[in-house]
Image (cartoon, rainbow, N blue to C red):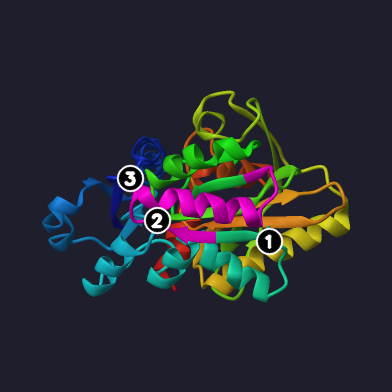
Amino acid sequence: MKIAVLYGGVSKERDVSISSSKGIMKALEKNGHEVIGIDFHPDRLQEIIELQVDIVFIGLHGKFGEDGSVQGMLDMLDIPYVGSGVLASSLAMDKFMAKKMFASESIPVAKDERYYIKQESEIASVSEDIRAKFDVPFVIKPNREGSTLGLTIVTDELEIKAAIKNAMQSDAFILVEQFIKGKELTVPVIGKMGEESALPIIEIIPKNDLYDYESKYSEGGSEHIVPAQIEDALTTKIKQYAVKAHQILGCETYSRADFLLTEDGTPYILEVNTLPGMTPTSLFPDSAATVDITYEAMIEQFVQLSKNK
């Protein structure tokens, strides 16, 4: 097929997108497809409008890539694409709304609160409200951002205002969550709509205290244990939650759900990623490899599932 790969973009995750898309394009070419790479920018939409391809593989992350914007444009142009549609992409990007949907289906979520802050003069009143509703430690992060960008674990109330300002650099909506101590787990999900299944669960052991941007994308930044060393019954439950979360949002083809597993065995879902990273250090390919799915075969499966949906 003739496949266009959209990469780069204008979000703070641009570098991750470029790294992901290099691997995607190489895999598609190895699989025999004709590949066109497009460094996506909202100022150059004509490149998309004039596309003559069989399908688009979206290798973007963050704003204008993962939030349904590009998906909506491709829908209007009647160009097929790999992955989730407008609504699922938008819902997954909005962590607060996604968690409300997860909670409605009895998937455990952390206590949270969302705030909309238009200007710095509102920070003081929001800070007081957070202080009244949450006990330290808690997390302050942008509601619509990925790769832990703009995230702060607040361990002292004196840090609240700085944490809010940090999150506001990425989004006017900020999310406050009660901090949960537990194992970092992630679960890739793949399959035809309504017939999805979960790949092996990964436990992530970051080299830093927090599974931050450096831990995610630097060589040796984290250790991945695949499959995670968890008892069978709990493994089954977490996989079921991941598939259910994928389906609740209406995701298509593939996604990856992130969890924190507490010592008492409660798996709290953090978010669902509709365009998870595909870099050399990424989690989805690591999990697939443990069940003998090569990177190239995985990418081809995404394309075939999307072509036939």
Amino acid at circle 3: Ser
**Nearest the eye: 248 or 309:** 248
Of mark 1 and mark 2, the one earlier in the sequence is 1
Which residue position is annotated with label 3? 11
**Nearest the eye: 33 or 120:** 120
* Mark nearer the viewer, 3 or 2: 2
Instruction: Describe the element under mark 3 as helix, strand or loop.
Output: loop
Numbered label attached to residue 109: 1
* Rendered residue at 11%/58% (across/down): 46
> Where does residue 169 sit, x and y in percent of width and height?
37, 43
Instruction: Describe the element under mark 1 as helix, strand or loop.
Output: loop
Quadrant of the image for the C terminus? bottom left
* Rendered residue at 55%/46% (across/down): 140
Which residue position is annotated with label 2? 117
Q: Is residue 281 left or right of residue 55?
A: right
Q: Is residue 35 magenta?
A: no
Q: Is residue 234 above or below residue 296?
A: below
Marks 1/2: CA–CA distance: 24 Å
Can residue 147 be spotted in the picture? Answer: no
Q: Is residue 212 above or below residue 221?
A: below
* Rendered residue at 65%/66% (across/down): 243
Q: Is residue 81 left or right of residue 225?
A: left
Instruction: Describe the element under mark 2 as helix, strand or loop.
Output: loop
Q: Is residue 115 magenta?
A: yes
Contact, CB < 8 Å: mark 1 with mark 2?
no
Magenta residues span: 114-138
* Mark nearer the viewer, 1 or 3: 1
Quadrant of the image for the N terminus? bottom left
Amino acid at circle 1: Val
Marks 3/2: CA–CA distance: 20 Å
